[in-house]
Image (cartoon, grey):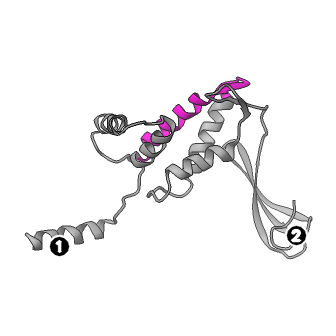
Amino acid sequence: MKCPYCGDAASKVIDSRSVGDGIRRRRECVGCASRFTTYERLQSKNLFIIKKDGRREEFNRDKLLAGIRKACEKRPLPTGTIDKVVDNIETELYRLGKAEVPSATIGDMVMERLGELDHIAYIRFASVYREFTDIAALKQAVDTLVDTNAGAPPPGQLPLLSQEELVHLGQRQRRQK
């Protein structure tokens, strides 16, 4: 393991902890004494994704992560939430025990989790995944989401405005009336 600071190949493990489906190791460089963290994960057998057009492509965790991050861009989500979602989906895919999985299965898993996590991210992802061709299809997806969740934000979602800002806005609106 090369030190990210000085490039020295020698490091010693200070602490190891089990996290999810892997191991987190705290390391110290022998050369410059800088500390850094590494994560080790068991590399499972190869998993292939069957695309809509029939092509087969090896599962790429980074591609899944990038897609979910794009949908969640500029949304008030707790730190590490997206990584946990991707970890959860990846674990579930490998637990299926299949060598090939349709891309629709992954898309459905993402949609399910984003629906619980953030409604705006859900709609953003759905607009690409479901390939909405007109505004009516988009409106139907939004209406379904609102009906299912009664318009309330998901329980784990951080608020866009702090409680203090909400009180301030409420006071300002009352003064304007």
Q: Amino acid at mark 1?
A: Arg
Magenta segment boundaries in residue numbering: 95-118
Q: Residue at x 11, y 69 (%)?
A: 174
Q: Amino acid at mark 2?
A: Gly
Q: Residues within 10 Å of mark 2 (few under 14, many from 20)?
A: few
Q: Residue at x 32, y 38 (%)?
A: 139
Residue 38's x, y, as percent? Answer: 76, 57
Q: Residue at x 88, y 69 (%)?
A: 7
173 relative position to 78: left or right: left
Q: Does 103 sit above or below residue 122?
A: above
Q: Residue at x 57, y 28 (%)?
A: 105
159 relative position to 147: left or right: right
Q: Residue furthest front?
A: 133
Q: Does the segment drawn in magenta span residue 110?
A: yes
Q: Are marks 2 and 1 in contact (CB under 8 Å)?
A: no
Secondary structure under badge 2? loop
